[in-house]
Amino acid sequence: MKPSMQKISVLLAVTALLTGSAVAQDEPIVLGIPIGLSGANSITAPAVIQATELAVSEINDAGGVLGRKLVIELADSASSAAGAQKAYDSLVYQKKVDVIISSEPSAARNAGLPIITRGKIPYIYTSFYEGGSCNKYQHINAWVPQQVVSLMVDYFMKDLGAKTFFLVGNDYAFGRGLLGDTNNYVTEKGGMVVGEEYNPIDASDWTATVSKIREANPDVIITSTAAGAPNVTFTKQLRAAGITANYGSYALDEGTAKTLGSDGEGIYLGGTYYTGINSEKNAQFLKALNDKFGAETKTSSELSVPNYDAVHLYALAVAKAGTVDTDAVVKALSEVSFDGPRGPIQMSKQRHAPLTMYLAQVNAQGDTTIIKSQPNVDPGEQCPNL
């Protein structure tokens, strides 16, 4: 009698495991996407969402991950620290998402990180930023100053003969961090910074800054402003003032450049993605995006494509780990690689990624022409203790 009962117990245990597994496979893997649907980043958010949706549909059409489909849970972070706290809290504790993937300002990221830590959830940050953000749950697939500053400044100094620079940013971590590195690099290379001005992230009046630029009469203006609205307001006011200095932007994306019309003409951009990248992977991506969204397709950019890559990288990490368990996925995120529109991306250097960098210039139609490229640029020391 006893052996029979043992057999029954084993059968019940196996049945419970199989049933639990079946239920788990029926449940989707939920991607939390906090994004500025309102505020400064609302201009760029639609393209980011489309790129994210395309990646999810591609993965689901191929069978999902571990037999489970991916779904997106959006939350408006209002392009701000306070908004991000609410969005991250909702996604982690109410929506119970499996991962957070975000393209947001540094202030929003910094506000969300404590919630990521308490919730113990994988996090992929996809926006270019000032560098040095380190968290045991975080990976970053976008550029840092070590990958872009020399690219832009060297071109102005060596190719265009520039000597004097005026730096303009929004007054938060990204603006001050990136322009601080730029100031140091310009000085190191024998140039001179003749002005450095900052405006609050929600400010729209650049009159005082433009007046100081006119007075300083620099060879080059370089901006490090929040993506979206600040790029538009500053550029339009600069152009209205008739200032003709060379103009380089770290934060103007290709989609926003198109909205500037002729005001955007001549601006130099530094980044990892432009629609003009001549590769089979980029052509496939742009076709898939257009096939999915048709006339509603937004211009892909430095802000949207890293989100597309991040979804694929997360899916690959889950597949490699064989689970959505946080510790296993975080470990796998440093090991997987995805070959997409920007080329192969692997977040293997202290949770950051070596990247192909491009210098491009905007024409009168808002399109970009790539001037030069540098493959496999190292992100340098970012998080040596992780």
Image (cartoon, rainbow, N blue to C red):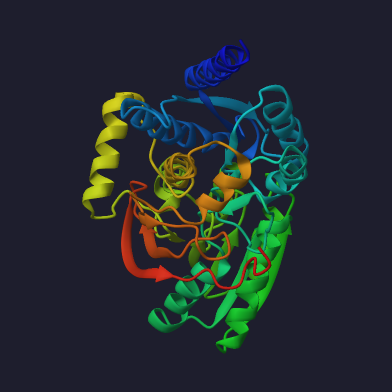
Q: In this view, does 155 lie to the left or right of 172?
A: left
Expressed as whole percent of the image width and height from the top left, the position of residue 369 reads: 31, 58
Q: Looking at this view, name the residue that lies furthest to the top.
A: 1
Which residue appears at 43% of the width and 29% of the height? 53
Expressed as whole percent of the image width and height from the top left, the position of residue 191 reads: 57, 85
Which residue appears at 54% of the width and 54% of the height? 251
Quadrant occupied by the N terminus:
top right
* Figure quadrant of residue 261: top left
Expressed as whole percent of the image width and height from the top left, the position of residue 224 reads: 60, 59
Q: Looking at this view, name the residue that lies furthest to the front.
A: 1
- Residue 289 in view in this figure: yes
Quadrant occupied by the C terminus:
bottom right
- Residue 244 in view in this figure: no
Expressed as whole percent of the image width and height from the top left, the position of residue 124 reads: 57, 46
Q: In this view, does 147 lie to the left or right of 39?
A: left
Question: For the image shown, how many numbered marks are present on the structure?
Answer: 0
Q: Looking at this view, name the residue that lies furthest to the left.
A: 280
Which residue appears at 57% of the width and 16% of the height? 16
Q: In this view, does 255 lie above or below 58?
A: below
Q: Looking at this view, name the residue that lies furthest to the bottom.
A: 190
Of residues 326 and 297, the one nearer the viewer is: 326
